[in-house]
Image (tube, helix red, strand yellow):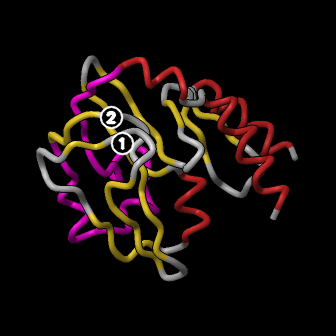
Amino acid sequence: MAMRLWASKSASYFKISVFNRGFATVLKDLKYADSHEWVKVEGSSATVGITDHAQDHLGDVVYVELPELGTAVTQGSSFGAVESVKATSDINSPVSGKVVEVNKELDESPGLVNGSPYEKGWIMKVELSNNDELKSLMDSDSYSKFCDEEDAKH
């Protein structure tokens, strides 16, 4: 218990939220979709990936289907898929816009999604077309509560 308390205090200092769902983390400066994708907005650009919670439930990722550069993506619509040893899941875009970059490292190392879902395991970067859509996404506290409620159902 003391170790968990220490980890929570340390995580808070580093702007990381730690919860009792194993080792799944939720970063405070991101926005989250209920389909378990995250988005980090920097100006008119958004970086997108799947959450630690999602990769934890998927298991070892063996393939990531990346979108093509220039593809238009729409909030809530599928733009690719993640294949793991357990299942294949669609990846939905949390924002609308045009794909301007994809993480080609995932072609050779799809496990980056497991090992570093918020940093090295990002999937695409999008030029945003509608910043107002961000208002419909969850902050870290809301997403953590959402995950806890979802996990309690299973």
The tag on residue 48 is 1
Report whether 66 appears left or right of 36: left
What span is in magenta? 101-130
Q: Would you call the spot at circle 1 few (<14 residues within 10 Å), some (14-19), or many (20 or more)?
A: many
Query: Where is 122 relative to 6, above or below?
Result: below
The answer to whether residue 116 is above or below residue 45 is below
Query: Quadrant location of the C terminus?
Result: bottom right
Q: Amino acid at mark 2?
A: Ser
Question: How crowded is the residue under tag 2: few (<14 C-alpha within 10 Å), some, or many (20+)?
Answer: many
Q: Report the disc number at residue 117.
A: none
Q: Which residue is mark 2?
A: 96
Q: Secondary structure at mark 1?
A: strand
Residue found at x 46% / y 24%: 134
Q: Residue at x 42, y 51 (%)?
A: 92
Residue nearest the observer in this picture, 40 or 150 = 150
- Image position of 27 (left or right of 84): right
Q: Nearer the viewer, residue 153 or 132?
A: 132
Q: Which label sits in the foreground, 2 or 1? A: 2
Q: Position of residue 107 (x, y in %)?
A: 21, 68
